[in-house]
Image: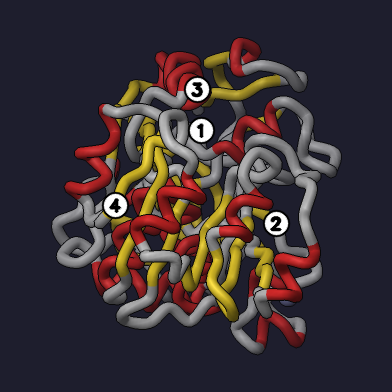
Amino acid sequence: MKAAYYDKHGSYENIKIGERPEPEIKEDEVLVKVKAFSLNHLDIWVMEGKYPAEIPMPHIFGSDASGVVEKVGKAVKNVKEGDKVIIYPGLSCGICEKCLSGKDNECGIFSVLGVLTDGVSAEYVKVPAVNLFKIPEDLSFEEASTIGITYTTMWHSLVTRSRIKPGDIVLIHGGGSGVGTAGIQIAKMMGATVITTVGDNWKVEKAKEIGADFVINYKEEDFVEKVKKITDRKMCDIVIDHIGEATFNRSIACCKRGGSVVTFGATTGGEPKINLRFIFGKNIDIRGVYMGTKGEVAHYLNFFPDKLKPVIDTVFELDDVKKAYEKLLSRQFFGKIVVRID
Ligand code: ZN
């Protein structure tokens, strides 16, 4: 089968397009013909060797995809050949206490498709049948390929863990990122006032179009001062910070008493200087989030495409996959970057 893969760690420049063997499925697995996959920063961390585990080489990468069921194992009941599906990329054992409680992202062997296993940047990928969900009506393969990691992480962060409610004030950093656009939509749908940050003025109107009430260009304005002004010094109930070192202490400053700060990424580094007095002095919760659960996917898919709608920046062909990662690293995009496979 045709695949994009690399055989050593480093830059996306190492990606090759070539032939790789088609995966063989077990009785509880499904072979999916990939129609589109979307890019995540996780792909880059794994590619550059920053993920704290040994990655098998050569490696087919990528985690989020949509496609058509090509072949099912003997024990598979939930999907059949020809079904159009979204792949939820969280892999877990299915039988431990956490999995049985529906907390599959806390399973002892939880990992993400395309990290320790071959991923979705190929004509075919094999996945456990329990990881497949039917694509909601009226969503294209390109749109469906962007849902997995972004909406699951944001649903878990805002709804499950932070118990967002109507009237909450929510600050979401990186409003133009994949998770940012998903978070703005979810927070808005739940009746919150949404403040977001962007690094380019051309992203301001786009963030407002998808539901942000206030947009701060953090390169031009101090976002803590601006949040103070917008909220009349009440500050935020929930702050979503996937930026890390560059923002985390100031994100805590944006939180009101009893509020919470969520972290699930650290694109600027993972060891921020934190003032503990801010945390205990304001009764603040800090929550770490690693994606979310299959139950959450089954739930939030009901809101597509009316209340939630994927935002796509650009669609590339598989042969241009390097250009897709170049764009991801440039930060000059709004929403998700998708690669189509014919
Ligand atoms: Zn488990």
Residue sitting at 35 percent across and 67 percent down?
A: 187
Locate residue 319, reporting x and y percent: 41, 15
Please tell me which of labels 1 and 4 falls first in the chain.
1
Amino acid type for the residue under numbered disc 4: Phe
Name the quadrant where ligand 1 sits.
Answer: bottom right
Number of the label disc, if any, that sits on residue 325:
3
Pick the residue in front: 175 or 279.
279
* 180 with respect to 304 (left or right): right
Residue highlighted by disc 1 = 121
Q: CA distance from mark 2 to mark 3?
A: 22 Å
Q: SS class of the residue under badge 3?
A: helix
Q: Position of residue 78 (x, y in %)?
A: 41, 74
Quadrant of the rendered image containing residue 86: bottom left
Q: Quadrant of residue 123?
A: top left
The three-letter amino acid code for the residue at tag 2 is Ser
Question: Marks 1 and 2, Cα distance to the nearest angstrom?
Answer: 17 Å
